[in-house]
Amino acid sequence: MVTARTPLMAGNWKMNLDHLQSIAFVQKLAWTLKDADHDYSQVEVAVFPPFTDLRSVQTIVDADKLDLVYGGQDLSPHDSGAYTGDVSGAFLAKLGCAYALVGHSERRTIHGEDDAVCNAKVQAALRHGLVPVLCVGETLEQREATETPSEVAVAQLLVGLEGVADDAELVIAYEPVWAIGTGRVATAEQAQEVCHDLRAALAERFGAERAAAIRILYGGSVKPDNVAAIMREPDIDGALVGGASLVVDDFAAIVRYRQHVGA
Ligand code: PEP
């Protein structure tokens, strides 16, 4: 289905590729997409490298005038000060980042980030002109223990967006934890069901018009061979891709889902 929302294909590299590898990767990705005549205004392409790669990615994007955009995998809820190991949204903005991931399930589970922390990070991103990509999604246990599949994701969304201005630019990523890095992709119908409920919650929070403009991505074992079915769903506006985003040809094929599968 065609919507007014420009699809966004976002590659989350996690803790993979050092700064030298990031340069080679971004160049190869850009060449591959150029060879294929990819139109970035039709499908936006973003990568989320480790922090230590960002300056290198910025340099190559600027020098080669690439249309792909990039972001941080996380950011501090604070702007500056005695927060050892944290990275300020101000620094990410200075490096030309367009986006910042917030509340990826690996941050929530490994680093114990709760919805209040995610909310502070969303606010921090917005303070620095970054578009937060707020990740929400249920574990398998939560899915089995709740009445509707969307209950956990909607609750995470509402707390994560507390105090956010009605006109703030946002991206939401629905990532069922049981589908991340497991090879167990949600069916297109399962993904659509939750993304629909997330959009309904956004409509209650921000109004229908604003909700219709916010992009909702699906993430969880997205690959070239399953992306087209997911992208046919009306409330899914792109994908947050982990493993497959580390293979140039696979990620390029995901970006070009319309061409190679006729979606
Ligand atoms: C992710 O890291 O956000 C993700 C969805 O990973 P994968 O595509 O490997 O499941």
Image: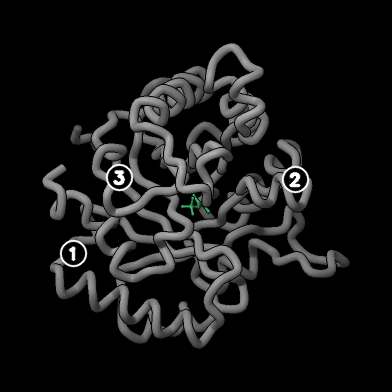
- The residue located at (41%, 31%) in the rendering is 191
Q: Residues within 10 Å of mark 3 (few under 14, many from 20)?
A: some
Q: Left or right: 174 with respect to 153?
A: left
Q: Residues within 10 Å of mark 1 (few under 14, many from 20)?
A: some
Is residue 210 in view? no
Q: Amino acid at mark 3?
A: Asn
Q: CA distance from mark 2 to mark 3?
A: 30 Å
Earlier-in-chain disc, 1 versus 2: 1
Earlier-in-chain disc, 2 versus 3: 2
Is residue 256 in view? yes
Q: Quadrant of residue 78?
A: bottom right
- The residue located at (78%, 65%) in the rendering is 80
Nearest to the eye among marks 2 and 3: give it: 3
Q: Which residue is mark 2?
A: 113
Q: Amino acid at mark 1?
A: His
- In the depicted view, which residue is nearer to us: 5 or 108? 108
- Image location of residue 68, percent across then percent down: 34, 67
Q: Which residue is mark 1?
A: 38
Quadrant location, the N terminus: top left
Label 3's element?
A: loop
Q: Which residue is mark 3?
A: 226
Earlier-in-chain disc, 1 versus 3: 1
- The residue located at (37%, 32%) in the rendering is 187
